[in-house]
Amino acid sequence: MEFNTKLLHGRSISKNPGKEILPPVSQVTAFQYESMEELEKVFAHKSMGYAYSRIGNPTLTAFEQRVNELEGGVGAVSCSSGMSAITIALLAVCSSGDEIIVGSGLYGGTISLFHDLEKFGIHTIFVDKLTADSVKEHLTDKTKVVFGELISNPSLRVLDVAEVSKVAHEAGIPLFVDSTTATPYLARPLSLGADVVIHSTSKYINGGGNSIGGIIVDGGRFSWDFDKHTALSDFRKFGKRAFLLRLRTDIWENFGGCMAPANAYLSYIGLDTLGLRMEKICRNTDALAKALEGISGIEVCYLTLDSHPDHGYVESELSGYGGGILNFRAGSKERAFKIINSLKYALIASNIGDLRTLVIHPASTLYIHTGKEEMEAAGVYEDTIRVSVGIEDAEDLIADFRQAIENADLKDENE
């Protein structure tokens, strides 16, 4: 099946008990049983079933199975947020004294998380760009995972999954990829060599800006060395499924970072239109980027532009699309604010992946607690504007940004 058909008719689209065309929302805390013997088996993982929504819920299962099928994994675990998903995935394989190699061009919240992990004794090695050479240079006996964003937000650098995973695997290290900005519509990192895929489902997967969530998908192909990855040693009998089993029955359950059933339902129905939305969003972003590129005093960053250093990955890794985010530099923070404040259609908001076009000044918001050097390594400057393009008509978006830039320049002249 092609992508949109699989979304609606894939193996994960199961028949519901009441013949509903969508999974029911099991908005409950606990599930009742006829006997203690039955419930005991569920708690001991000797019988299929649900006991308490923190450790499993049928609405979550329906959502997890659907995303897992799109990514081609062996299992998925949904979380309360994208940040929760990254945290739990890393803690499942790392202990105090371990090291993580990451690309510096990360979302600001993820950078802050890695600094928090330092307080627990987990050290992060930041490299300018996550490549096969930079990973090879920083590998040590303490390295337990390599982590990167497939399309970094907001710097828009592309991770060469095949090359980086090859080097990591030669050293017995898994590659974890945050594919939020790419979505399964543009790329499936597991097929390229990644071992674990993570999404903030609050973004493109949900699409409607109505619920927070995250998800971890395990490829189930990595051969774990349990003497090296001691955090998984209690699960060695599960072999290549050890990571997934530790997530499901241990760390995810104990940390309590479960997704709410209502949020799982909203994200489930959001998936129905993921392919249609991404195609429209990507085409809009390409058109807006090319229109802005011709405006004096504006420096545009978008993957389909010939000027972008990772332009070649559009065809080789991203199905011919550049994603739904573009950045441009306005020349100064003051001019950036004036442009943003003059927009009519774009909403000033901190999310991405919405149906609506969203705009923000990252340096004064998402990176407000990040040092200047780290911020610029992530592709964020004092005059950077990030645009998450929506599904409006491209002609209207182009006209809106043009008038906003003209109005900003007029205000400068009047001042």
Image (cartoon, grey):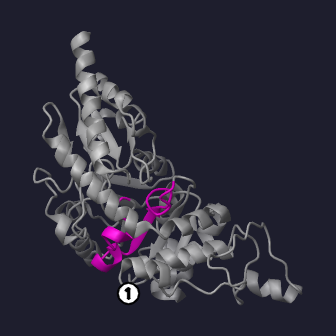
Above or below, 295 against 397 in this view is above
**Picture residue at 27% right of the left edge, 16% below the top:** 411
The one of 280 and 78 positioned closer to us in this rendering: 280
- The answer to whether 30 appears left or right of 126 in the picture is right
- The answer to whether 59 appears left or right of 152 in the picture is right
| Mark 1 Cα shell of 10 Å, populated few (<14), some (14-19), many (≥20) | few
Q: Quadrant of residue 181?
A: bottom left
Q: Is residue 183 magenta?
A: yes
Q: Secondary structure at mark 1?
A: loop
**Is residue 109 something that shows in the picture?**
yes
User: Which segment did they paint magenta?
Assistant: 181-208
The one of 395 and 368 positioned closer to us in this rendering: 395
The one of 324 and 281 positioned closer to us in this rendering: 281
**Is residue 144 something that shows in the picture?**
no
Q: Residue furthest left?
A: 306
Q: Position of residue 306 (x, y in %)?
A: 10, 54
The one of 356 and 89 positioned closer to us in this rendering: 356
Q: Position of residue 272 (x, y in %)?
A: 49, 71
- The residue labelled by disc 1 is 1
Q: Which quadrant holds the C terminus?
A: top left
Q: Residue furthest right?
A: 35
Q: Is residue 395 magenta?
A: no
Q: Which quadrant holds the N terminus?
A: bottom left
